Image: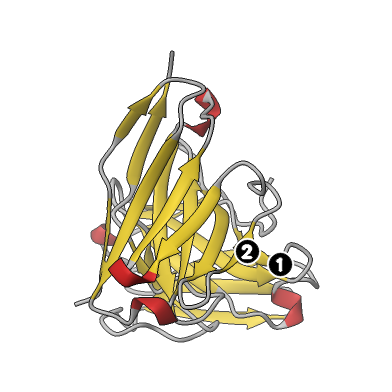
Amino acid sequence: QSVLTQPPSVSGAPGQRVTISCTGSSSNIGAAYDVQWYQQLPGTAPKLLIYGDTDRPSGVPDRFSGSTSGTSASLTITGLQAEDEGDYYCQSYDSSLSGWVFGGGTKLTVL
Amino acid sequence: EVQLVQSGAEVKKPGESLKISCKGSGFNFPTYWIGWVRQMPGKGLDWMGIIYPGDSDTRYSPSFQGQVTISADKSIDTAYLQWSSLKASDTAMYFCVAGQHLEIGDYWGQGTLVSVSS
């Protein structure tokens, strides 16, 4: 059971927009700790996609955007592409556990 | 270019010890937090712990405290994850991850696959 809750799967057609939710609590997202999103393509290591709730590292397309509200965060992908297919994880810091917490991951399928 | 290069895959028996490594390059290693993340077959990411090589400040997830040891040698820009007695349930891919801030994993290693079976 992950501390952060994500939907197991989402899907969309090429060109469409999808949103992945991430629900936490008052000891992590709700405590204003930054939320990060990682993309893990099949057979590869995770890669930082969004940090500090909304910021993109250099090289990440602006099709990817993040937001937070209260104890939840969201990752939105617009103009979906076939190469976006993979697993997406949210992550934050938890004051009760004094460490990182992850969501269970969401498998994105591009139809 | 920032790189984290991890040691190769390991095949071990239950009860054996193991130490895997993660060598950083392209960044000021002692000033980055280096964490370890487990991914069991077909499963999600589990945070194990983190170390600041500059002063060896180390934090562990409650789930992994006492089960593994995280260390680092800043003179050779390398972090380590070790087990004193492996179990079959330790079979997983292990990733190291580096970040300028405690909470963020900026860069990831390629992963080390550990297989434990009798």
Q: Which amino acid does label 1 sit on?
A: Ser
Chain ID of residue with mark 2: B
Q: Which residue is drawn at 62% across and 73% down?
A: A73
Q: Which quadrant of the view contains residue A95?
A: bottom right
Query: In terms of depth relative to the viewer, which is nearer, A18 or A71?
Result: A71
- Looking at the picture, which amino acid does disc 2 mark? Arg
Q: Is mark 1 on a helix, strand or loop?
A: loop
Q: In this view, does A49 lie above or below B117?
A: below
Quadrant showing the N terminus of chain A: top right
Residue B5: image location, x then y, percent: 25, 58
State left or right for residue B4 relative to residue A67.
left
Q: In this view, does B36 lie above or below A30?
A: above
Left or right, residue B6 beside residue A108: left
Residue B9 location (% of width, % of height): 28, 37
Q: Which residue position is annotated with label 2?
A: B59
Which residue in the structure is indicated by mark 1?
Answer: A98
